[in-house]
Image: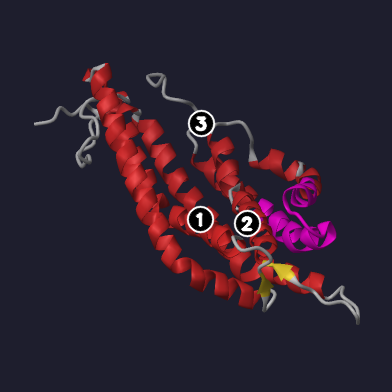
Amino acid sequence: MSRLVDDSHDEPIESPHRLPGAPTARAEMTFLEHLDALRGVLLHVVIATALGAIGGWLLSPRVLEDLIARTVGTAYVLSPLEAFNERFKLALLIGALLTGPFIFYRIWAFVVPGLLKRERGMILPLALVSMLLFAGGLAAAYYYVVPMIVRVLAGFTVPGMLMQIRVSDLLGFFYNVAIACGVIAQLPVVTMTLTALGLVTPGMLLKQWRYALIGAFILTAVITPGDVVTAQLILGGPMAALYFVSVGLSWFVARRRRPEPDPEEV
């Protein structure tokens, strides 16, 4: 039977549902046992990445066709390898999204025995929420932000202009905007974490709202390529709204914080 340690002392415990190759009791493992456990984790990550890439390759034509239909209607290929290269990169991205939760779980199963109770209670929920928010940011970019930016920019053409977009340019633009949306969506997690650590307070965030709005539009201009003004109008507004949502979440976390730390905790 595995040894259990009372959580009230904030000591590492063994995960009761560990995967094969995961450590048993981290404090009792030798260096070679650590390496063997890490090798098992890396092997699972490599296999999952390969399987995800295969799945992404099968799904990439449908995703690419739908993205083109939502944005430019017709995209052009100007080199023999362009179609293959862009489909391959898109397959890797889709594969990462498909296998990301499993890879996180596998890494988490490896490190959790060495974490304290408070660390486990904080890291896991924040990581899960962060992944969900990042996925939500990618979905917003795919369904809303990128099509809207392309439509707005297409409206600047005049008679005699013909907009012809390469597949590589379209996907590169999509990747940048999608990553920007995913990063922006992390604002609630960052705010809640800083509040839980006592580094910021809801009152402090409210006092700095003017600087936050300016920073939101500047950050949007920096991380989003293309027409800066259009990107600021489309992304800056939602980012500012997300800031005030984060202030509300910060207030919720601040209320749940204990006024005084437990003297027994390190």
Residue sticking out furthest to the right: 159
Residue 41, located in which quarter of the rendered image? top left
Residue 242 lies within the magenta run: yes
Q: Which residue lies under the disc numbered 1?
A: 93
What is the x, y in percent for residue 205? 70, 42
Residue 17's place in the image compared with 174, above or below, is above
* Residue at far front of view: 80
Name the residue at 48% across, 59% down: 91
Q: Which mark is residue 15?
A: none
Identify the element where label 3 is drawn: loop
Task: Write down the residue under mark 3.
Answer: 259
Query: In the rendered structure, which amino acid carries the disc numbered 3?
Result: Pro
Visible residue check, residue 109:
no
* Residue in the picture at 66% in, 54% down: 176
In space, the residues marked 3 and 1 are separated at their CA atoms by 44 Å
Which badge, 3 or 2, comes first in the chain's sequence? Answer: 2
Residue 46, horizontal then vertical, whole percent? 36, 43
Residue 105 lies left or right of residue 147; in this view the side is left
Label ID, residue 175: 2
Q: Quadrant of the N terminus?
A: top left
Evaluate if marks 3 and 1 touch, with contact meaning CB atoms under 8 Å apart.
Answer: no
Q: CA distance from mark 3 to mark 2?
A: 43 Å
- Assign the C terminus to one quadrant of the image: top left
Residue type at numbered disc 1: Leu
* Distance from Cα at disc 2 to Cα at disc 1: 9 Å
> Is 13 drawn above or below residue 95 in the view shown?
above
Q: Which contiguous range is marked in magenta?
A: 215-244
